[in-house]
Image (spheres, helix red, strand yellow):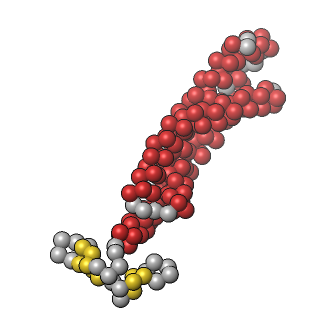
Amino acid sequence: MYLLNRHVLKKLTIAFLIGQMAYGVAFLIQSIFMLLEVIVEEHASVTMGFQYFLTLLPRIITYTYTMAIMFSGFFVTSVLAENSELVIFNSVGLSPRVQMKPYIWMGIVSAVVFLVLQFHVLPYSREVRAELTKQISSQSVLASMEEGRFNAISHNGFLRFRSRNSTGELQN
């Protein structure tokens, strides 16, 4: 019994990881375009761009997680049926309840992981991304200002500075 559960859980886990990667690629492509937009238009450094990308990963994982779980359940069941393993399980006398045990455990564990992702990791990554976006925006403004000239910062506001120090801060 233990070997059967371990065999099915191993197949479910492998199928889940493959599904997570397959569905994640589509969201990664979209995120790469968002990342390039931040780097090019906002004049962000590559390290800040990489940090921004890391804050997008929890969002990508939560979007693709449920689809990967469903994919793994359907895929493993179809593989077991194709290889006549379900027939063998039935002929040995295993009840459907015993056969479903690995699926139920996978569902319970994945629900707990999803809830942790959804209610703890995702809000934290949103906060970090918002702070990083503010930081990138402020650096974008500083990067576009020219030394020794009047720079428009609003409709009626101008800023003039003499030079920048070694860290990029404005000097009067």
Determine whether, in the image, residue 77 is placed left or right of residue 121.
right
Report x, y in % for residue 66: 53, 36
Q: Within the image, what quadrant is residue 87 found in?
A: top right
Looking at this view, is 31 or 67 the one in front? 31
Q: Residue furthest left?
A: 156
Closer to the camera, 69 or 32? Answer: 32
Residue ID at (61%, 27%): 73
- The x, y position of residue 9, in whole percent, is 72, 32
Report the residue at 66% width, 24% height from top: 76
Q: Is residue 113 above or below residue 97?
A: below
Quadrant of image for the N terminus: top right
Residue at 77%, 13% (x, y): give it. 88
* Closer to us: 157 or 75: 157
Q: Is residue 33 above or below residue 162?
A: above
Q: Is residue 57 left or right of residue 88?
A: left
Q: How far from the left and from the top, in percent, is residue 127?
A: 45, 62
Q: Relative to residue 103, is residue 150 drawn left or right?
A: left
Percent x, y of residue 53: 52, 53
Is residue 62 in view from this perspective?
Answer: no
Q: Is residue 31 left or right of residue 161?
A: right
